[in-house]
Image (spheres, rainbow, N blue to C red):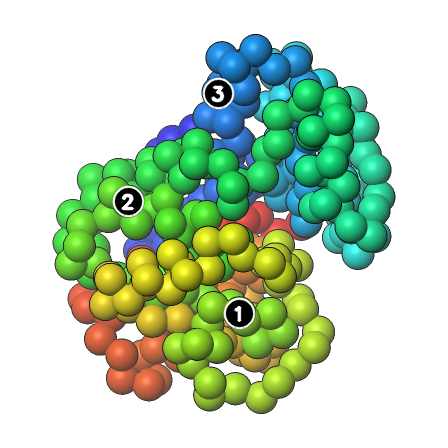
Amino acid sequence: MANTPLVKLDNIYLKREDQNPTGSAKDRAIPLQIEHLKNQGYQQAVISSTGNAAISAAHFCHQHQIKLTIFLSPKINPHKLNLLKNYEAEIIISPQPISDSIKFSKTNSAYLLRQSTDPVAQIGYQQISLELTEQLPQISSLFIPIGSGTTLLGISQKLPPQVKIFGCQSVANSPISQIFDTNFTPETRLITDALSAKFLPNKNEIIKTIKKFNGSAFSLQNEAIISAHDYLKRLGITTSLEGALSFAAYKKAVENNFSVGDFPVILLTGAER
């Protein structure tokens, strides 16, 4: 998957990963993982997901005739669940989808499509940075939503060192951003459900990478995320709340006098579901 549009909006640029075939940046990594599992001789795969990765996996596993089992939390977004039901994959609702998918992988010789522990996934996300440097050689900063952090880590591997990386998380789930940004009021309602990862195997590496690229991370209130979402929609840009989170983080950076340069890019990681 490649060549998603880069759209100029006033003095910023939007990288439209929400326009990938299944509507999210997961389409960068999943096809590469499936190609790898086929080369390794696997006949089936398993994934735990908040929705977007599962949708991508269901789509591409169907294309490659790979049997797929999906473990989902009972809190799954109902719109994403309905999309998944259009595929032939087996869906299992579980209160512990991650641990159950790992067990399933071991007992059924199924390839585990867990991006945070699969180096192949990071290679897929490198394509985003390669495209960006072709589309906008002057890119000065990049705002990236953080779930497991795999997207950020993959992009960083091919990003020029002068580009600042800014991570973005909701206040309701901010294991990375709260290390850099404590200027927020605690909230418990997580509206960016695609960024619900609690345990981050690569947490230290994510923090180190943000610092290496002279960036930071921002904790965003729900009100700011919704406001950014509504603003983008009024301009004809319909994207997920995760994408709006990135835009809200850019606004917070500017308001707090962070240097983002003349060519900041905001990653819109998923379509509105």
Q: Residues within 10 Å of mark 1 (few under 14, many from 20)?
A: some
**At which x and y percent is residue 23?**
56, 40
Callout 3 touching callout 1 (CB < 8 Å): no
CA–CA distance in space, label 3 to label 1: 31 Å
The numbered disc on residue 167 is: none
Give the vertical position of 251 relative to 10 (above or below). below
**At which x and y percent is residue 208?**
32, 62
At label 3, the amino acid type is His
**At which x and y percent is residue 128?**
34, 41
**Residue highlighted by disc 2:** 157
- Residue drawn 24% across and 48% down? 159
**At which x and y percent is residue 90?**
80, 28
Q: Which quadrant does the N terminus fall into?
A: top left
**Left-right relation of 177 to 254:** right
Of the two numbered discs 3 and 1 on the same chain, state the one appearing first in sequence.
Answer: 3
Secondary element under disc 1, as helix, strand or loop, is loop
CA–CA distance in space, label 2 to label 3: 20 Å
- Residue drawn 41% across and 39% down? 122
Q: Residues within 10 Å of mark 2 (few under 14, many from 20)?
A: some
Secondary element under disc 3, as helix, strand or loop, is helix
**Residue highlighted by disc 3:** 36
Q: Quadrant of residue 142?
A: bottom left
Of the two numbered discs 2 and 1 on the same chain, state the one appearing first in sequence.
Answer: 2
**Residue highlighted by disc 1:** 175
At label 1, the amino acid type is Pro
At label 2, the amino acid type is Gln
